[in-house]
């Protein structure tokens, strides 16, 4: 799986080409997502309503390889899976099932809540938000909290 190498939305992955708005598009390459988050396609659509974005729900190995190849986060050549990668040139958000499940468990959240947070986080990155500096991070956290509140997801920054 490389950024930009996606297939069109299909019923198996959540919705079909008959839908009025084909975005966000969704590709589920790791079937564990269906067990991890009931109605995962519905959650993706709610979290990213109106966003022109492609979502790939993958496994940890895929994210580890992409992270290493694209050096997206962490030290150059990082060979670790990350929870989410965003690719602005292709408007893609790619998430790792195992990392999301572990982070949800560690934070005492349902996996659906953690997935919603990471989808919103990725969408904000695609919209130009960053968190490299304290002021930027605060601005992004506030935007995440507002969007998550509309989804009924608790503020992830309240308890940190």
Image (tube, rainbow, N blue to C red):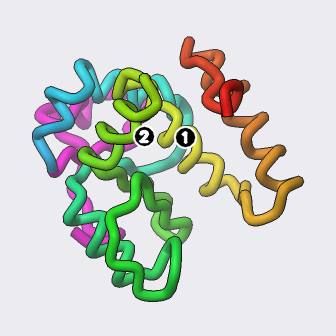
- Dot 2 crowding, Cα within 10 Å, few <14, some 14–19, many 20+: many
Q: As drawn, is 10 to the left or to the right of 47? A: left
Instruction: Name which of mark 1 and mark 2 comes first in the sequence.
Output: 2
Residue 20 falls in image quadrant: top left
Judge from the rendering whether residue 46 lies leftward or rightward of residue 153; answer left or right: left
Residue drawn at x 37%, y 25% as measured from the top left? 112
Residue sitting nearer the eye, 93 or 99: 99
Q: Is residue 45 above or below residue 121?
A: above
Viewer-side residue, 65 vs 105: 105
Instruction: Specify the quadrant of the image occupied by residue 28.
Output: top left
Question: Which residue is at a point 74% across and 65% down the rendered structure image?
Answer: 132
Mark 2, secondary structure of its residue: loop
Marks 1,2: beta carbons within 8 A: yes
Residue that carries the numbered disc 2 in the rendered image: 24
Residue 97 visible? The answer is yes
Side (left or right) of 37 relative to 73: left
Residue 133 is a magenta residue:
no
Image quarter where the C terminus lies is: top right
Residue at the far top in the pictured view: 152
How many marks are shown on the rendered structure? 2
Residue occupying the point 37% across, 38% down: 22
Callout 1: SS: loop
155 is higher (above) or lower (below) than 127: above
**Residue 61 x, y percent position in the rendering:** 20, 64
Does residue 56 appear anywhere in the picture?
no
| Residue located 23% across and 65% down the image | 62
Position of residue 21 relative to residue 79, above or below, is above
Numbered tag placed on residue 51 in the rendering: 1
Does the magenta stretch mainly form a helix, a strand or a loop? loop
Give the residues drawn in magenta, as a range.
1-29
């Amino acid at each position: 799986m490389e950024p930009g190498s996606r297939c069109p939305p299909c019923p198996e992955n959540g919705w079909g080409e008959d839908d009025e708005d084909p975005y966000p598009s969704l590709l589920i390459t790791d079937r564990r997502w269906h067990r991890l988050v009931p109605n995962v396609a519905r959650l993706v659509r709610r979290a990213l309503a109106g966003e022109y974005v492609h979502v790939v729900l993958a496994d940890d190995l895929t994210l580890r390889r992409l992270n290493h190849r694209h050096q997206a986060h962490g030290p150059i050549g990082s060979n670790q899976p990350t929870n989410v990668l965003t690719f602005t040139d292709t408007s893609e958000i790619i998430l790792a099932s195992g990392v999301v499940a572990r982070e949800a468990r560690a934070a005492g959240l349902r996996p659906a809540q953690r997935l919603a947070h990471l989808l919103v986080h990725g969408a904000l990155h695609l919209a130009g938000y960053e968190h490299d500096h304290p002021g930027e991070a605060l601005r992004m956290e506030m935007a995440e909290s507002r969007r998550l509140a509309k989804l009924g997801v608790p503020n992830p920054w309240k308890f940190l």
